[in-house]
Image (cartoon, coloured by chain):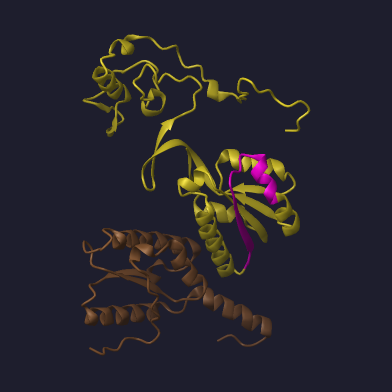
Chain colours: A yellow, B brown
């Protein structure tokens, strides 16, 4: 899932300076699961903001509303009447970067601010602990690396490894960081597939550095659609 | 034992301190409480394994949140005792009350009182 962490409170406070009526929109999917921007986190942040602004002598009226997904027009639509009636000075989003942009795009006349920093695609290791596992590079080599992503786990993001910095199973950057390519070797060895490590993967295409659009087979982009 | 403890301490019962949520504690301050302390079972003695340890983590977290807001984080504390320790309960209640008295009232409450006095044109003391 997409994981995020809340921005420092001082940064959020500074962004909302001068705004008197704000709607904080939470997202009920990924950021809710990773305890960063769901209904509960919206309530906590709103309470904090309300209290600090009261202390500063600049009271704020802040409402919270959490929708199922901010990356889907279908769910964003339920905010239309709330935002129209609310006459908010500003919107704040606790969704990932995708959701924040979609919210800002839907209400272009109202300033929209992010309350979280999106940190990546991660697995849930334990309650509250998320470990990044994918950089969405558009060039998956997991089939050849025994299901271990070298782009994410290797400090150099090497598609072919290991490099000379592998040190007794760890990376040269830290003794706490396992060497991705050592783990790949171990995994492939266990599967009796060590020949895979000798295969040369093509160099990284840096496909994630340009805007990407995905249209699944069997679908097409609607014509005359406003974006 | 019929021990006395300060009357300003209001007890909110929860099934386990693991039930205490950050939002519960924040709301107490928002509603004007001067201080809050959570009293859990002794560490290692939680019937639910780690409810009291979770509460301790949350108390630590809310102390940081309060500091960010502008309220002293030390207005929240965590204590541990067993259900057979009446005198210790009394001791903690007195200790916390004295500590909060030394910190003064919740600045938020103060602020709202001050604002009300200003609105009504009454001298704020």
Percent x, y for residue A148? 36, 25
Q: How many marks?
A: 0
Residue occupying the far right of the picture: A224
State whether residue B100 is above or below residue A12: below
Quadrant of residue B101 in the image? bottom left
Percent x, y for residue B33? 46, 76
State whether residue B19 is above or below residue B119: above
- The front one of A99 and A220 is A220
Image point (32%, 9%), residue name? A198
Identify the image quadrant of the C terminus of chain A: top right
Image point (45%, 67%), residue name? B24
State whether residue A168 is above or below residue A192: below
Give the magenta part as a residue range: A58-79
Quadrant of residue A188 in the image? top left
Quadrant of residue A21 in the image? bottom right
State whether residue B30 is above or below residue B117: above
Image point (40%, 63%), residue name? B63
Percent x, y for residue A152? 41, 28
In reply to whether residue A47 is colored magenta, the answer given is: no
Q: Is residue A126 left or right of residue A18?
A: left
Residue occupying the far front of the picture: A218
Percent x, y for residue A162? 31, 18
Q: Is residue B22 left or right of residue A22?
A: left
- The front one of A105 and A76 is A76
Residue A165 visible, this orientation? no
Residue A197 visible, this orientation? yes
Q: Is residue A83 left or right of residue A194?
A: right
In reply to whether residue A72 is colored magenta, the answer given is: yes
Image point (54%, 65%), residue name? A52
């Amino acid at each position: 899932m997409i994981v995020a962490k809340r921005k420092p409170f001082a940064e959020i406070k500074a962004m909302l300076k001068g705004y008197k009526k704000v709607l904080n929109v939470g997202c009920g999917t990924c950021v809710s699961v990773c305890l960063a921007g769901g209904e509960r986190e919206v309530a906590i942040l709103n309470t904090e903001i309300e209290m600090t602004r009261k202390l500063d002598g600049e009271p704020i009226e802040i409402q919270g509303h959490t929708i199922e997904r901010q990356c889907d027009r279908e769910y964003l639509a339920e905010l239309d009447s709330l935002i129209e009636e609310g006459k908010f000075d500003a919107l704040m989003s606790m969704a990932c970067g995708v959701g924040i942009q979609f919210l800002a795009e839907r209400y272009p006349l109202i300033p929209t601010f992010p309350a979280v920093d999106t940190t990546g695609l991660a697995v849930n290791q334990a309650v509250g602990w998320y470990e990044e596992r994918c950089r969405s590079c558009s060039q998956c080599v997991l089939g050849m690396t025994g299901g271990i992503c070298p782009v994410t786990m290797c400090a150099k993001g090497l598609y072919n490894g290991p490099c000379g910095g592998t040190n007794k199973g760890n990376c040269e950057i830290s003794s706490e960081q396992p060497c991705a390519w050592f783990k790949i070797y171990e995994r492939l060895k266990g599967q009796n597939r060590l020949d895979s490590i000798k295969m040369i993967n093509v160099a990284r295409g840096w496909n994630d550095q340009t805007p990407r659009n995905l249209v699944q087979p069997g679908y097409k982009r609607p014509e005359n659609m406003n974006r | 034992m019929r021990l006395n403890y300060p009357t300003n301490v209001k007890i909110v019962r929860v099934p386990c301190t693991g039930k205490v949520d950050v939002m519960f504690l924040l709301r107490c301050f928002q509603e004007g409480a001067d201080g809050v302390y959570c009293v859990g079972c002794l560490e290692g003695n939680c019937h639910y394994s780690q409810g009291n340890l979770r509460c301790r983590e949350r108390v630590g977290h809310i102390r940081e949140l309060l500091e960010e807001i502008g309220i002293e984080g030390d207005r929240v504390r965590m204590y541990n005792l067993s259900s057979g320790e009446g005198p210790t309960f009394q001791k903690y209640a007195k200790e916390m009350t004295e500590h909060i008295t030394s910190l003064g009232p919740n600045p938020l409450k103060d602020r709202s009182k001050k604002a009300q006095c200003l609105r009504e044109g009454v001298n704020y003391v």
